[in-house]
């Protein structure tokens, strides 16, 4: 699997990340494996897809972690000009990030996959449709439902965090 990833990715660390993502994907979707195809072919395709997603992600935007303050926007956070934010703001943002991660994990796998590919990885809807081998309208519907479900789950929790 590492050899396949390194064919696509020049950096060793990126290849390792792609293989790790592939293993996670295999664990999540092993039940859907069709015994009619070879396991090696299925694993190869997953590694290729993870490698391609890594390349697309790198082309689109530099990687930023939620833990590194990616949710902060300078206009809404006056402390950025003056240094470290107050402890209560750090705690509130940390709790919000954890809540968002939890709620994303609670989404059905089909919705979660589309949401992560679009809103976290930044892929276009047509790319997602091609990657998942689904119709564009199916991708749009899954994304809409995932965002709606996430909003419904986060609404009360987000209000509690900032009240």
Image (cartoon, rainbow, N blue to C red):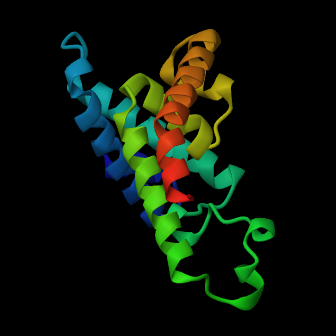
What percent of the width, then of the height, locates residue 15?
43, 56
Quarter residue 61 falls in: bottom right
Instruction: Pinpoint residue 138: horizontal percent, then vertical percent.
Output: 56, 12
Compared to 82, does 74 lie above or below? above
Q: Is residue 63 left or right of residue 32?
A: right
User: Which residue appears farthest toward the bottom when viewing the image?
Assistant: 82
Q: Residue at x 59, y 69 (%)?
A: 69
**What residue do we see at 60% from left, 36% from top?**
118
Residue furthest right in the image: 75
Q: Quick check: 144 above or below 104? A: above
| Identity of the residue drawn at 33% across and 52% down | 20
Q: As rendered, which of 157 and 51 lies closer to the eye? A: 157
Q: Nearer the viewer, residue 22 or 123?
A: 123
Q: Residue at x 57, y 30 (%)?
A: 147
Q: Is residue 42 above or below residue 10?
A: above
Residue 6: horizontal and vertical position, in percent? 44, 53
Q: Quadrant of the C terminus?
A: bottom right
Tell which of 39 and 91 is nearer to you: 91
Q: How many numbered marks are there?
A: 0
126 relative position to 42: left or right: right
Q: Give the x, y percent position of residue 125.
A: 66, 26
Q: Quadrant of the N terminus?
A: top left
Residue 121 seen: no
**Residue lying furthest front in this view?**
163
Q: Is residue 20 left or right of residue 39?
A: right
Judge whether residue 125 can be spotted in this image. yes
């Amino acid at each position: 699997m590492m050899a396949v990833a390194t064919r696509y990715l020049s950096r060793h660390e990126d290849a390792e990340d792609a293989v790790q993502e592939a293993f996670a994907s295999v664990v999540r979707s092993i039940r859907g494996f069709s015994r009619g195809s070879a396991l090696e072919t299925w694993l190869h395709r997953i590694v290729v897809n993870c490698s391609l997603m890594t390349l697309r992600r790198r082309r689109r935007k530099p990687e930023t972690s939620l833990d590194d303050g990616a949710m902060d926007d300078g206009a809404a956070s006056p402390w950025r000009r003056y240094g470290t934010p107050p402890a209560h703001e750090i705690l509130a943002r940390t709790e919000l990030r954890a809540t968002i991660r939890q709620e994303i994990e609670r989404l059905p796998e089909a919705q979660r996959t589309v949401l992560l590919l679009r809103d976290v990885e930044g892929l276009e809807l047509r790319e997602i449709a091609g990657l998942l081998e689904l119709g564009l309208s199916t991708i749009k519907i899954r994304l809409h439902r995932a965002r709606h479900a996430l909003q419904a789950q986060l609404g009360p929790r987000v209000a509690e965090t900032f009240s």
